[in-house]
């Protein structure tokens, strides 16, 4: 699925940095609409239902280890998935790309104006991920009662839905964050400000994972994204945006 999305970008130019400008304080593009709030509410509800089904089914079966381990795997996988997704929209496509265009424009412009992300209101920031989460989790809630499946799905997609908020927190000073968030960042449970700062050095090609960042060292040390970029360039002639960024 991810590879299909990337290869579909072959004939699309990368968004030029020169046309990117930071949002104004009253820019409608940063303000939460009622539809944004509704999607976030629905997304949270579907995730909580999935989590509740996992807990209830585990309680009835008296088997807790499987769902708990599944939740841990979901949390770890969420960070990995966020890295692949972040890498893809950072490097391929542009504002006119179907469905993904607004996110691509936002992420690619984010390198030039990193604090612009913090200007977006909560639901405005999360509604796209909440909508995607709803369409994935809702059928699972309807069709499945397995506590292990729900343990994985609820944590995996719950973390992905809030990954953009974790990303925002990684750009905020400690003084503006709740103490619990700071503690989770310092413990490595959530993406830390220090770790994410490494991503914002040209050519912006490291530390793509934005849930906890636990995968970043492995992915960068083993040049996983670099290998994918070279494969796509050789096989399809698609150059990633990071190759055009200045490095110093």
Image: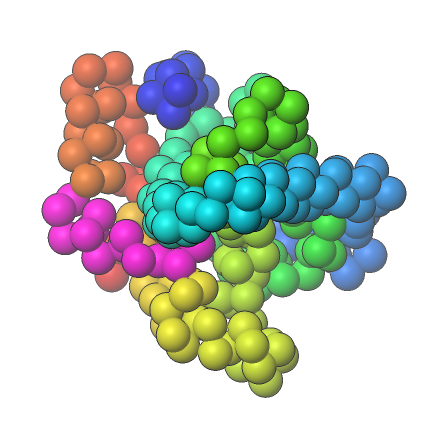
Q: Magenta stretch: residue 30 in it?
A: no
Q: Magenta stretch: residue 214 in it?
A: yes
Q: Residue at x 41, y 65 (%)?
A: 189
Range drawn in magenta: 210-223
Q: Residue at x 58, y 57 (%)?
A: 165
Q: Quadrant of residue 235?
A: top left
Q: How many marks?
A: 0
Question: In the shown orientation, is residue 98 left or right of residue 49?
Answer: left
Question: In the shown orientation, is residue 103 left or right of residue 77?
Answer: right
**Residue 222: image x %, image y %?**
13, 46
**Residue 52: image x %, image y %?**
62, 45
**Residue 226: image x %, image y %?**
20, 39
- Examine the rendering and report whether any part of residue 37 can be seen: yes
Q: Residue at x 40, y 20 (%)?
A: 1
**Residue 116: image x %, image y %?**
61, 59
Residue, far bottom:
175
Of residues 165 and 138, the one drawn nearer to the viewer in this rendering? 138
Q: Is residue 2 above or below residue 162?
A: above
Image color mode = rainbow
The quadrant the C terminus occupies is bottom left
Q: Quadrant of residue 224?
A: top left
């Amino acid at each position: 699925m991810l590879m299909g999305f990337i290869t579909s970008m072959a004939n699309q130019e990368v968004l030029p940095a020169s046309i990117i400008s930071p949002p104004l304080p009253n820019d409608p593009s940063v303000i939460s609409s009622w539809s944004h709030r509704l999607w976030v509410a629905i997304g949270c509800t579907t995730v909580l239902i999935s989590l509740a089904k996992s807990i209830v089914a585990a309680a009835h079966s008296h088997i807790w280890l499987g769902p708990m381990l599944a939740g841990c795997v979901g949390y770890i996988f969420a960070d990995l998935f966020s890295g692949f997704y972040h890498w893809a929209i950072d490097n391929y496509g542009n504002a006119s790309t179907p469905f993904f265009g607004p996110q691509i424009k936002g992420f690619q412009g984010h390198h030039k104006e990193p604090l612009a992300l913090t200007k977006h209101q909560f639901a405005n920031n999360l509604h796209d991920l909440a909508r995607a989460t709803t369409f994935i989790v809702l059928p699972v809630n309807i069709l499945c009662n397995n506590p292990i499946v729900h343990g994985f799905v609820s944590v995996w997609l719950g973390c992905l839905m809030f990954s953009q908020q974790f990303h925002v927190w990684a750009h905020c000073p400690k003084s503006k964050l709740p103490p619990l968030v700071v503690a989770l960042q310092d413990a490595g449970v959530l993406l830390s400000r220090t770790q994410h700062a490494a991503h914002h050095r040209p050519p912006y090609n490291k530390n793509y994972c934005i849930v906890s960042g636990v995968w970043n060292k492995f992915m960068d040390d083993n040049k996983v994204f670099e290998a994918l970029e070279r494969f796509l360039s050789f096989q399809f002639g698609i150059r990633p945006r990071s190759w055009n960024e200045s490095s110093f």
